[in-house]
Image: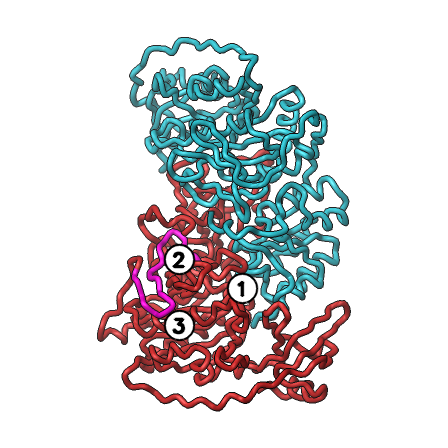
Chain colours: A cyan, B red
Amino acid sequence: MYGKKVSSLLESINADVMDRIRLSSGKVVLEGEVMPSTEANDLDVLIVKLSSGYNIGIDPSKYKVEKIESAKRTTERPAAKFSRNRELPDVSLIYTGGTIGSMVDYKTGAVHSPTKPEDLLEAVPEIAEMANISVLPLMSMMSEDMAHDEWARIAIAVAKELNNGARGVIIAHGTDIMHYTSATLSFMLSGLNAPVVLTGSQRSSDRGSSDAFMNLTCSTSVAARSDIAEVGICMHHTSSDTACAFIRGTKARKMHTSRRDTFRPINDKPIALVERTGAIKYTGEYRKIERGEAAKLKLMTGYDRKVALIKVFPGSDPAVIDFYREKGYNGIILEGTGLGHTPITPTRKEDSWLPYVKDAIDNGMIVGMTSQCLYGRVNTNVYRNLRLLNSVGVVYCEDMTPETALVKLGWLLGNYGKDEARKMLNTNVAGEIKSRTEFDTFLV
Amino acid sequence: MYGKKVSSLLESINADVMDRIRLSSGKVVLEGEVMPSTEANDLDVLIVKLSSGYNIGIDPSKYKVEKIESAKRTTERPAAKFSRNRELPDVSLIYTGGTIGSMVDYKTGAVHSPTKPEDLLEAVPEIAEMANISVLPLMSMMSEDMAHDEWARIAIAVAKELNNGARGVIIAHGTDIMHYTSATLSFMLSGLNAPVVLTGSQRSSDRGSSDAFMNLTCSTSVAARSDIAEVGICMHHTSSDTACAFIRGTKARKMHTSRRDTFRPINDKPIALVERTGAIKYTGEYRKIERGEAAKLKLMTGYDRKVALIKVFPGSDPAVIDFYREKGYNGIILEGTGLGHTPITPTRKEDSWLPYVKDAIDNGMIVGMTSQCLYGRVNTNVYRNLRLLNSVGVVYCEDMTPETALVKLGWLLGNYGKDEARKMLNTNVAGEIKSRTEFDTFLV
């Protein structure tokens, strides 16, 4: 299924899927097994499994490629046959890339890609008992490369599936920026009346410790069976394989580089815990599906990419605001300290952020304030420095994460006028602001 | 104890400490009680307790000031007499400002400042049983205004106290950037052979829920009794008043805007838990005090302020690196996604960070990589994008927090040549890098 360039290259060294190859370029030497391509792989990218167990996508034209060992071939899997079960709901799985992109068939041990429904069903047979799954390969990207263009494409694809009768949608996605995507989709899919479930994996599916299978099972359960009408992330709740958490898309955050329970709700409880069998236990408040209301979905994919997130630190140079102003930026989210501070009266007077923030706002920029503490809520009422920032027009973003505030501002500026965007920034739109933070939502 | 300007103003409206006043300036109207000044308050700042319970410092010349109610006077506290107890160790308390700056005497109910040892001992009598405390007012700043100048002043003050025979040092400090300070002091106080304890409070001392008293008691215990030869933060371990945690200075982070247990160890365990009675229970590994080694302390207060922390986000403009380069910056810490990613092959090619990072490094800048996940460890070995960043010379900062990596880089560049600084950035100096992350250090 590779494109012409990669296919000819593999042919030229007599290498096939599962054969071991070496790629060298200067000091960089990579060794691993050739993986099958995904159908979504329309770039000239070769997928190789490194000995670490991780798969990487490589442009082989930049490397010297040699075959070093032939694979031990196993018997070919017989082609699977699955037919639509009219008793089950229809669920669409939109594939966008990431570590979940490679799947092992745990009956045959063969590695293959999940971009054909049959393959997916063979790898995780449990989900066929819950729903008729259609798999849509939309793109094949590592999530750190994604931005607003991809968010709009995903939102459009989700809307299409829902309008075509899907009961719910699963989005397979890289984990790096999954929470930025989940927040953006929460805003773009206005009036959503179905579950939209982002999932992925921290370990590729061909490792014993992979989280791909349970994450897919639990995500299917939420998409096929829950009455949740929100966008959320469904991945491991703890480090063990007992349950997944379904976390509100605007309140989720990747909090660990490698753990399977990396996604955590910030200032919120999970909406639901989903056992590995698929049983759903609701644990938080959520918007429920309203029957007969499917037509309410309104796609709002506008996004102003001229928004930036700036983390404030001791001695930080406030002139960075001017850098963005000169580039025509329309909005900035500050990640301040504590309750929402920047230096205001530092020893080096030129390091005060107040005049720069004031200038930016006077020139029409929207400046929002969040906290690098992540947990808790910014508050203008406590200290003088906060009042000063507030008095020049900084919008205090309540209990939003910096990441959610950033994409919300991009979305607001892409869909509304500036005055309305400013007003809406600290008004709840999609569960991103809770008027009261429950006590047991710290480090959960 | 106020300076001339503030004293005359208060006199002119016949207002004294504890009287209720109103300050107005345009739309801003503040009401509260006049607090006593700190001796450290050499600026013309009036301290007012708002009805929220928080104290703010205000330049009253910018406001119209009226007295609105006289205080109900209580009997004057008799001047306390404390003499040095030769059986107890000497501990110095360096006062730098912050919310802990106002203290209530919980026997008389009067509010006063802790800048005289007698006052402090009256407010928290327990600590007089543990140590002879000398209080040194060094500065009176909200911590969000602090930067490297203040860090060097504090380090020098600590060294002076230790060289003069103090067994340990407590630093009363605002909480906003306390973890940046604790990390910097960990580097600046090279060869430290005594406990150096930063503490503060999230609620001012005259609120029933104040954490100031227990934090001071526990901090005194660590400074006077522990065998820990490290810089750390000692504040509430949980939201209840049962124990404080003493957290390594390079591994601590403020994780909540308002909770009293806001400081958490990141990828580390607390070094010790300290019960409110002062009993110390060691819970992690630490460097122990070596007897007869007091002379090893070497002050290294150099700091290159031309270092910046940049948080990477989807669609972020990598040209911000050039902004810092053109300003003569010598180092940048990136707060990447996941295992340490930036966009490398995004749809909009101009958004790739790779050429900007490469240019910066080729031009002599040090670029370090941390993760915005905060927990976990960056890793160059897994994905292609990581290998590419590594191949152009990005230094992967292991399990360091972005904040610690930033101040470490500033300190390295201020004390070593560039080549050595680059090498040392991902080598452990002061507990900031653990070669292996223990499992139960996530969200603790």
Quick check: A149 left or right of A424? left
The magenta segment is B264-282
Residue A176 on the magenta segment: no
Image coords of residue A175 (percent x, y): 49, 36
| Mark in front: 1 vs 2 | 2
Left or right of residue B238: residue A269: right
Which three-letter amino acid code belongs to the residue tagged 2?
Answer: Lys
First in sequence: mark 2 vs mark 3: 3
Q: Secondary structure at mark 3?
A: helix
Mark 2, mark 3: which one is toward the viewer?
3
Mark 2 is surrounded, within 10 Å at the Cα level, by few (under 14), some (14 to 19) or many (20 or more) other residues, namely many
Q: Residue furthest left?
A: B292
Vertically, is B9 above or below B398? below
Viewer-closest of A326 and A229: A229
Residue that mark 1 sits on: A315
The residue that appears at 34% across and 79% down in the rendered structure is B129
- Examine the rendered structure and indicate whether residue B407 appears above or below residue A229: below
Give the label on residue B251, or none.
2
Q: Are marks 2 and 3 in contact (CB under 8 Å)?
A: no
Determine which quarter of the picture holds residue A155. top right
Q: Return the residue at label 3.
A: B217
Residue type marked 1 = Gly
Label 1 – label 2 distance at C-alpha: 20 Å
Tags 1 and 3 on a common chain: no
Residue B226 in which image quadrant:
bottom left
Query: Disc 3 marks which amino acid?
Result: Thr
